[in-house]
Image (spheres, rainbow, N blue to C red):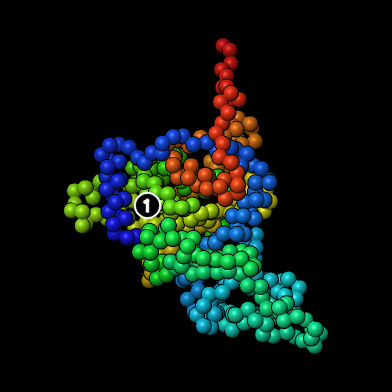
Amino acid sequence: MERAIELDLVQRLLDYSRRGRTHEADSIAYNPVSLYTDPDILAREREVLFRQRPILVGYADQLRGAGDYLTHELTGVPILVVRGRDGAVRAFLNVCRHRGARVAEGCGTTGRTFICPYHAWSWDTAGKLAGQPDAYGFVDMEDERRSLVALPVAEEFGLIWVVPTPGASIDIAAYLAPLAPYLRGHDLARWTFLHTQDIRLRMNWKVAVDTFWETYHVPVLHRRTIAPYFDGNRNTFDALGPHHLMVTTKQGFQQNQERPQAEWDLLAHASCLHSVFPNTALIYLHDHVEIFSCFPDGDNPDACVVRFEMLIPEPAQDERTAAHWQRNISIILDVTAEDFTTGEGIQRSFRSGANEYLSYGTFEAPLAHFHAHHKLALGIPQRRPDRSRAPMATTPAS
């Protein structure tokens, strides 16, 4: 990130540390529980948030050379992304124009063509039909039905973005403009893609998102794992359009105040969490980047898929370094398992009727910000609980 921003973040965090406080909003925020359970809301989310907006689908390191490709289906749309012979990144529906089979699986290098496994139709990396066995049977086929169907795609900050709707437009520079001063300095195009893993969970995708946007739970839920390494409920918050930035401090961060300002180092003892609306958390640490992208899993509001991915500065050069990164992955998965197990219980509790609204404390501003933009995107009015209808907790008579 830009140095002036880094210094400002360090200054704010040092101030919070001296005062024993954290960033606070002006008031408590509320969010209806029904937004996590209503199938109609989920249908609107899938159409508006996961079909009409740029979605992170991959990384520059996965598409270094001509013919390198990746596939992605977590939006519910089969996507194929490839680096062309001219160096440009292109995206298509991963669907054969003959009978609809997938023309590629997983990721890798295709060489010059993709070949459908069903009838061996083939397409070049620009999506043009390259081969068609017994072509005489299709002489009347219109030209527009021969090429793969293109999707809007962009490469920015070492990240690959796709709008999963044919004919839509993409202006990734405008979409990410509020985040640009924060993402620009990390130069992820030079980083190495290390790991990907899909985690299927029995909870709404927004419960998974909520995991990342407050640190209030860290001293309690993670007391046996990462809590001893963090300063507890202490973080900055910056609203950046529909996106936001949250920085949380680790033990040792206060050492910055003993150094000249020119030597202040944010990431030495802090984690920078960028929310890329609607579904991605980019988490920058001192030596690696963790990415969590949360997606609905089909039409069930009680199910989601979280894709965990990791980038490192350079490939592991020896077994010792490889083992170091594997330990990091194991620790991350152990910690998020604590979050996700709790989240699945939260989702079950939504059906009990105990809560009509969830409440976000003043120091949970990132949650309030995300959900305000979620409702704004879907055209859902911002409402507060009707106090006259609030259920009263009761205590059994002794």
Compared across the picture, whether 242 is left or right of 271 comes to: right
- Please tell me which residue lies in front, 198 or 166: 166
As displayed, is residue 215 above or below residue 76?
Answer: above
Compared across the picture, whether 259 is left or right of 123 comes to: left
Q: On the image, which quarter does residue 22 sit in? A: top left
Instruction: Give the quadrant of the N terminus.
Output: bottom left
Q: Amino acid at mark 1?
A: Ser
Q: Which residue shows up at 51% across the image and 35% down it?
A: 359
Residue that sits furthest to the top in the current view = 398
Specify whether residue 72 is in view: no
Q: Which residue shows up at 30% across the image and 36% down it?
A: 20
Residue 19 percent coordinates (x, y): 27, 37
Q: On the image, which quarter does residue 217 sit in? A: top left
- Please tell me which residue lies in front, 266 or 53: 53
Q: Which residue is mark 1?
A: 271
As displayed, is residue 183 above or below residue 39?
Answer: below
Instruction: Give the quadrant of the C terminus.
Output: top right
Q: How many marks?
A: 1
Residue 98 percent coordinates (x, y): 75, 76
Specify whether residue 214 is in view: yes
Residue 27 percent coordinates (x, y): 44, 34
Secondary element at image label 1:
strand
As displayed, is residue 314 above or below residue 230?
Answer: below
